[in-house]
Image (spheres, helix red, strand yellow):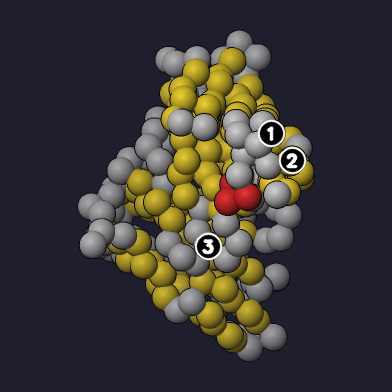
Amino acid sequence: GENVEQHPSTLSVQEGDSAVIKCTYSDSASNYFPWYKQELGKRPQLIIDIRSNVGEKKDQRIAVTLNKTAKHFSLHITETQPEDSAVYFCAASKNAGKSTFGDGTTLTVKP
Amino acid sequence: DGGITQSPKYLFRKEGQNVTLSCEQNLNHDAMYWYRQDPGQGLRLIYYSQIVNDFQKGDIAEGYSVSREKKESFPLTVTSAQKNPTAFYLCASSISAGNSPLHFGNGTRLTVT
């Protein structure tokens, strides 16, 4: 089955700096890669996703890159703000399949 | 207002008792999922259902059971066979399985003593 590894498990940055979280997956058939943000005590919510026919996608301060050959994808947050502090999860799935999640990254943005 | 509703928010049970967690969605999504979240372990899939009257085991299905008799509902029963049932349980739905984002409920925190 699919295995998703996520690094780092914790990340601390200064406000205004960039943050990068990386994930690798094992199943070459996976073709959908979402990222979720979970604030303390709340539900995970989708922040950005990418499909295997695209190499990069941006949404304001957030971007995701995908390298299908190496089977890894990354989340990039620029100009970080204290409200970006949360746990971030990557996931991988394929058509009609289940979503497999990474173990999460706790991001702390220090003012 | 479309969404996915889990109830109750907190649930307490004695060891040896079965307990059922409710999950309802009005998003007209075909696929529904149950995840368990423990501190530092991310989200682990218990069961998922791609369509009504069909469901499949996830990675940690032992000690759990589900049903999918209606499109809107996907209840999870935690049986006495689950060795460590105390956890935060998240229900989710998606338009279809595998290629669309998950919409999560607010979760149920189950404590078994």
Residue position marked by numbered label 2 in the rendering: A13
Where residue B5 sits: x, y (%)?
A: 36, 67
Q: The N terminus of chain B is located in which quarter?
A: bottom left
The span from disc 3 to disc 1 (Cα, nearest Å) is: 25 Å
> Quarter-wise, where is residue B26 in the image?
bottom left
Quick check: B106 above or below A28?
below
The residue under the point 46% across, 35% down is: A48
Mark closer to the chain start, 3 or 1: 1
Where residue B30 sits: x, y (%)?
A: 29, 48
Q: Chain of mark 1?
A: A
Question: What amino acid does circle 3 point to?
Answer: Lys
Residue B46 appears anywhere in the view: no
Where residue A88 sits: x, y (%)?
A: 61, 45
Residue position marked by numbered label 3 in the rendering: A42
The residue under the point 52% across, 32% down is: A62
Q: Chain of mark 3?
A: A
Where residue B38 sits: x, y (%)?
A: 67, 61
Q: Nearer the viewer, residue A74 or B56?
A: A74
Residue position marked by numbered label 1 in the rendering: A17
